[in-house]
Every structure is written in structure tokens, then in C-alpha cells.
Amino acid sequence: MTELELLADANERAQNYIAAVGKRRVFPDLNSLANLVAFDEPWSERGFKGADVLRLLDEKGSPATVASNDPRYFGFVIGAALPVAAAAERLMLAWDQCASSFDNSPVAATIERITGGWILQALNLPRDSAVGFGTSATACTIACIAAARRAILARRGWNFDEDGLIDAPEVRVVISESAHITVKKALRILGFGVKRVLVAPTDAQGRIDPLRLPPLEDRTILCLQAGEVNTGEFDPFVDLIGRAKLAGAWVHVDGAFGLWARASSRAHLTEGVDGADSWTTDGHKWLNTPYDGALAICRDAHALATAMNSDAVYSFTAQDAQKNLTLEFSRRARGIPIWAALRALGRQGLAEMVDRHCDLANHIADGLRAAGYEVLNRVVLNQVLVRASTDEETIAIRERAQASGETWFGPTVWQGRPAFRLSVSSWRTGEEHADMLVKLLASFLREGDSTNAESA
Ligand SMILES: *Cc1c(COP(=O)(O)O)cnc(C)c1O
């Protein structure tokens, strides 16, 4: 097969896969999982033809995929790739750009610079902020917190780049009791010991309670949250950021999915968040772009550009080159699928998608309440937190739903008890899929009732 024939083969297989979305099982069956053994072969001495490599991938790989690109998938906050974003990504792969700077890829540098501006408009954040396109919210949080620490130390006359951390003035961190695990991971990697991080207690919806906020100083990094993973709730930004500003602290916001509320009619939920110093958010969740695509946004563009600087004698570029704004040096042009999504949706299309997901989450919550479930959160956004009457029943129903192949969503623990978490974040999901989910879960509850009655 020639290169073009191989690409055509890949294209046909991809088209067949997409054509079956909505029809295949949402989680693969045991048979498909068992067939993954086909990949467990010794690494070949002489290699295989490209067509053969692709055939194995499709024949044994495709059936074992989790159909997160399916309207009936409600797990995590995964979203589904918008067709235009996935298609742009495919063209980008043909370009094979190393999007580190203008010299390496004028087209990537130009498009990503413009996309960064659109992101700031969509999220209504300070327009002079630096926007780095990173692999994930995790990586972007590392970049932003590194910039925060370096800036705080510089204010105290400490040269972090030259003198590092040994004997440096202490920088304190305050995080929410319900901070995402990846924020804790970022802090751990950066050398903020988990035991030293101060934890701000949260209320029943997972929001920091301002009255119980640990003391802030001008050497504090306060990490807030836009979109709690279980409840979808927001910290009270106006109050908390007001206090942080008075203290001279740096505020970082993890808005992996929730920051996109700013692009919708729910923007009021995030009031005051634009007063922070840095923000992270994902494209690959609610914007429905392919993995990996996330954003590190920093009000003080210089702070991010110096913390992430990777200029070398053979590669000296503009401060705002992407290799100076994120962890990566060589990188794919991950801003391009984000550009494609934003250009295709426009301001109205994006608002409509985010609003529709929030409306559907409410619709699901109403349906489940009517069916006899307990909805544990206020459903302000796209997340629904649910429990049946007993913990055993909650777990059994979730496992049954996962095994059905009709849908998929994940477990969580909320206030010490098992619950399950439904997230509406796919452009494909419509009212019919929400209704299907409610009907399925209602039937499980009824069948559970009759089993209990029989055994009583
Ligand atoms: C998913 C998520 C993260 C981590 O994002 P990645 O892109 O997977 O690294 C962080 N915070 C919140 C609230 C999330 O939902």
C-alpha cells in the first residue's frame, strides 16, 4: 500500500467507526475485552506492513473502545470530539508541525496566537493574559503554580531560577477541601508537601466557606475551583478573591470544565473569577475538542513566560512563543482543533451547547427525582450527583448500568457515602438520550423494589 492508500484505509475505518457511534455498546463486552490478547504478541523482528498494523488496530482495538464519543456516555466530564475539531486535527497530523515557535511553524504560531485571544473573549478573562496550550489541566496547573511561586519569590528578592528552593522564603498554599486530585498532584510535583498545604473547609455543595478560610498573606497561593467535579459548583469568587487581593496573595483557579460556564447564560455563577491571577481549563472536556488540549492562562504574561522559558542559543524566540508558555518544547499544534471548534461554533454556538448541557442535567435530575432517586446537588451546571435509598442499591444500580452497554457513568463518594455522578458534556447528547437514561435508571429501581418485595 502506498502512503495515500494507507491514509485512505485509515479514513475508511475511522468513518465506519463514527458511523456506528450511538449503536455500539458504550462499554465493551467481555468478548471484545478478551480479544485484546491479540495485541499481546512478541515485538516483531522484521515488522509488518502498514495495512496489517492498521487492520489489527481496527479489528481488535475498535470493539474494545469505551464509546465516550457516544451520546449515551455520561462519565467523568469527557465530552465528545466535535467533528470539525477532529477533522482539523486530522489535517494537522498531515502537516506534522512542531509548534514550538514561529520559526518552526508560522501557521501554528499564528493560529494559536489568535485562538488565545478568542479563548480570553470566550471566557471573558483579562485580554492581555498569556495563553499557553498545554496537554492537560494538570500540566497547565503545574505551569501556572510554577509561575506563581517564582513571582512571589521574586517580590521577596529571591532569584528562584538561580538559587532554587533551598533556603528560599516559604511560599504557602491554600487549597479547597474538595480540590481536584490533579491540583494536589501539581503541588506535590512542585515540592509543596501535602502536609504543609493549608486546606480550606467547604460547605455542603463543595464550595470554600469564606468564614473558615485559612489566613492569607502576600506569600500565599490560593487555589480556587470553578466547577467542583461532583456538584459542578463554584467557590464564592467575589468574596475570596477580594480577601486575597487585600492580602497580596496570588489566586489560581482550576476551571478544567466549569470555566466554560462563562461562555453561557450561566456566566453569573462565576462572578468575580476574572479577578484571579491565573486559570487553567481544558479544551478536551466541555469544549469537545480531541485530547490533549488544555490552557494555561496567566494575567501577568511575563510571569508565565519567564517561568516556562526555554530559549536556547539555537532557539531564541519571542517571549510569547508557545515553548515559553507551557511545559513542552517540541509539541503538536494542539491549539488548532481548539481554533476549529471556536470558529465553527461561534459565540452563540458555544453558549448554546453549554446551556443545553446544563438544561439536560436539570431534566435528568427532575426525572430521577420523580423515579425515586435522591439528587444530592443543586444542579447549577452540567453535573448530577445521585444516590438510591441504600448504599448497596446505589452501587448495584451503577454496576448494572455500566454492564448494560446502554450507557456509562462513574462512581464517586459524596460526604462519606457512595453516589454516582452523571455529567452531560457531549455535543451529541440530546433530550432523547437524557430520557433514555432516566427510563433505564427508573426501571432498575423498580426491579430492585420487586426483588426486595419477593425476598421480604
Ligand atoms: C478533569 C479535571 C482536572 C484535570 O484535568 P486533566 O486535563 O485531565 O489534567 C482538574 N480539575 C478538574 C475540576 C477536573 O474536572
Image: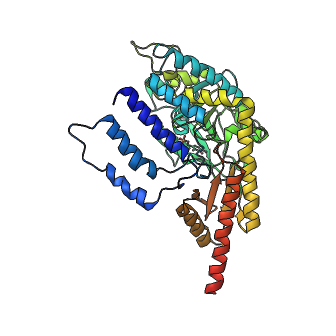
Residue that extends furthest to the left in the rendered view of this protein: 45
Q: Is residue 378 visible?
A: no
Give how far across and how far down residue 419 sits, in percent. Answer: 62, 62
Q: Residue at x 42, y 35 (%)?
A: 9
User: Which residue is nearer to you in this view: 47 or 155?
Assistant: 47
Residue at (66% x, 26% y) in the render: 343
Judged from the image, the quadrant occupied by ligand 1 is top right
**Which residue is at the front of the view, 378 or 37?**
37
The colour scheme used to paint the residues is rainbow
Quadrant, the N terminus: top left
Residue 111, image quadrant: top right
Q: Is residue 41 left or right of residue 334?
A: left
Task: Quarter of the image for the C terminus: give it.
Answer: bottom right
Residue 289: percent from left, percent from top: 58, 36
- Is 280 in front, or is 201? 280
| Residue 418 in picture, x, y percent from top left | 60, 64
Residue 387, above or below 330: below
Q: On screen, 296 above or below 433? A: above
Residue 359, compared with residue 322, is above or below; it is below
- Residue at figure coordinates x 66%, y 22% from the top left: 117
